Image (cartoon, rainbow, N blue to C red):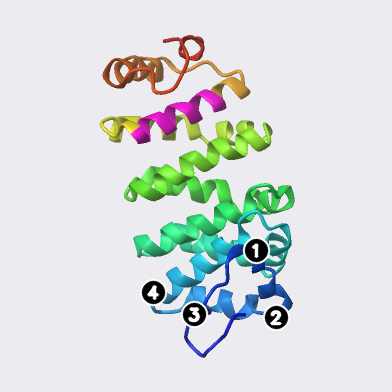
Amino acid sequence: MFKIVSNTLPSPLPPPHATDIQNMKLWPSILSLLSSPEPSLRKGAAWVCGTALQNNIKAQRAFLDNDGLRHVLTLLRDDPDKGVRSKAQYAVSGAIKHFPEALEAFAGMGGYDVLGEVITRADDPPTLRKIIFLYNTLMAEDPATAPVLRDNGTVAKLEEVLGKFGEDEDMVEKTVRTLHTLLTQTSTPAPATLAASLRTLKAQHGDLGLTEKEWREFGV
């Protein structure tokens, strides 16, 4: 069970029991901790949210109904603590994956703009890496996501990531894979500057998990 004590974080159960949060009407108490002045409490509350939401449609529904998605998006965009932002990203991801209604709400809240801001700041590589991976996951679930990302300037943002993190092979691999998904799903040719960067990165890092056919689709 969960025990709520004033100004303390509930001790979480394993994810299969996460719906107990709703049954015990604990979402308001947990979400209130996202506004705590203590970073450790904000971080812990975001972690509890993210853990409860993993592949749990009932928890995702309750989280959305309690306006939790808006709270964690705000943390992801604005919190000064990197640890809090990381757990907020975890909660955002858990809230919207495999739940089209939450993804629609996310878009309506400016969620894609928030993710774009985090990518543009590029000051938190672990969270940046997770967002890029999330993009690819969302496009795999619903190809309608790709045009939204394209129209939000995501290609240019990801090209900037390649320029800033070209020595980080894992970051490059995730970014290149996401770019390939985005460009192919929207039938968008790679900009000339991107194709040139990709040639350099391929020479530096190898095939990065792409087939020769996929590289040719980039124009490389």
Query: Which of the image's four quarters has the N terminus?
Result: bottom right
Residue under label 4:
40
Residue 121 horizontal/vertical position (percent):
36, 47
Magenta-span inclusion, residue 177:
yes
- Dot 4 lies on which element? helix
Q: Report x, y in % for residue 136.
A: 55, 35
Callout 1 secondary element: helix
Could you say whether the residue bearing mark 2 is in a helix, strand or loop? loop
Callout in the foreground (1, 3): 1
Could you tell me if the residues under marks 2 and 1 are in contact, i.e. CB atoms within 8 Å?
Answer: no
Task: Give the structural element (helix, strand or loop) at label 3.
Answer: loop
Q: Nearer the viewer, residue 209 or 191?
A: 209
Tell me: residue 178, above or below residue 57: above
Residue 145 makes an appearance in the image: no
Work out whether residue 4 or residue 46 is closer to the camera in this orientation and state it. 4
Disc assigned to residue 73? none
Q: Which residue is mark 2?
A: 24
Please tell me which residue is depicted at 64% across the width and 75% down the height of the picture: 27
List the residue tagged with mark 3.
9
Q: What amino acid type should be assigned to the residue bearing mark 2?
A: Met
